[in-house]
Amino acid sequence: MLILQEMSWPRGAEQELLGSSQASVKQEMQDFNQKAVQVYAARRNVLQIVRDVLEDHAVQEEQTQEILQLTEVAVKKVLENYVLMPDWALESTGATIDEERTSKSYGGKDMITWMRSLFTFFFANPPSTILQPSITPGNCWPFQGSQAHVVIRLPAHVWPTAFTVWHISAAVSPSGEVSSAPREF
């Protein structure tokens, strides 16, 4: 469960925040424009790679065009859903976790697990791991039990229109399965 908490600002902080926000917005726009160029180039590369693979496998031109059109639709959906929306729940933008109101991280159940953590430096990732943009294997927040909740303090007042929760797919999982991934939100 994701809970958004309204933030209250000390007096005068809004003006200070506004000034730094204007500079931040300019920087964000520059970063966005740079990313847009990179995304456009990546899109072209994906389509060219698909075309090359189809050519290598002697796929007929009519089928190639149909596959490329479907690939273009899929790439467009990915970009719309995952790239072109602002992510307010990133630590780098100022989001934080309310540790007191968030479920505990998984830490093992017995003395052996505790001892192993001392000698192998195996520590569970903290809840703030979910505020990072990475979805690589092992870079997740393991929580206790089969259900958990997290309270994220956003860096600004926002009206959320969408929520996305990511987990690695079986294709990139070292074990080939993702049975520990949350399935209900």
Image: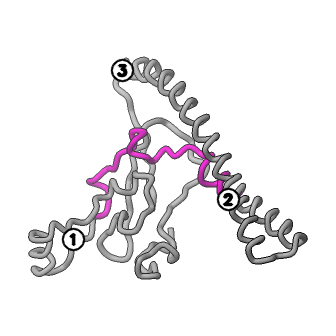
Question: Which of the two labelled residues, at mark 2 and mark 1, occupies the earlier sequence position?
Answer: 2
Question: Which residue corresponds to mark 2?
Answer: 46
Question: Which residue corresponds to mark 3?
Answer: 11
Q: Is residue 87 magenta?
A: yes
The residue nearer to you, when weighing 30 against 91, is 30
Horizontal and vertical percent position of residue 169: 51, 72
Point 54% across, 25% down: residue: 26
Q: CA distance from mark 1 to mark 3?
A: 41 Å
Question: Which of the two labelled residues, at mark 2 and mark 3, occupies the earlier sequence position?
Answer: 3
For disc 2, the neighbor class at 10 Å (few under 14, some 14 to 19, many from 20) is some
Point 34% across, 50% down: residue: 97
For disc 3, the neighbor class at 10 Å (few under 14, some 14 to 19, many from 20) is few
In magenta, the rendered stretch is: 77-104
Q: CA distance from mark 2 to mark 1?
A: 41 Å
Instruction: From the image, state whether disc 1 or disc 3 is nearer to you.
Output: 1
Instruction: From the image, state whether disc 2 or disc 1 is nearer to you.
Output: 2
Does 162 sit above or below residue 117? above
Point 32% across, 58% down: residue: 127
The residue nearer to you, when weighing 43 against 92, is 43
Q: Secondary structure at mark 1?
A: loop
Q: Residue furthest right?
A: 62
Residue 107 is marked as: 1
Question: Which of the two labelled residues, at mark 1 and mark 3, occupies the earlier sequence position?
Answer: 3
Q: Secondary structure at mark 3?
A: loop
Amino acid beneath label 3: Arg
Horizontal and vertical percent position of residue 39: 63, 47
How many numbered markers are drawn? Answer: 3
Q: CA distance from mark 2 to mark 3?
A: 50 Å
In the picture, measured across the screen, residue 105 lies left or right of residue 74, that is left
Amino acid beneath label 2: Val
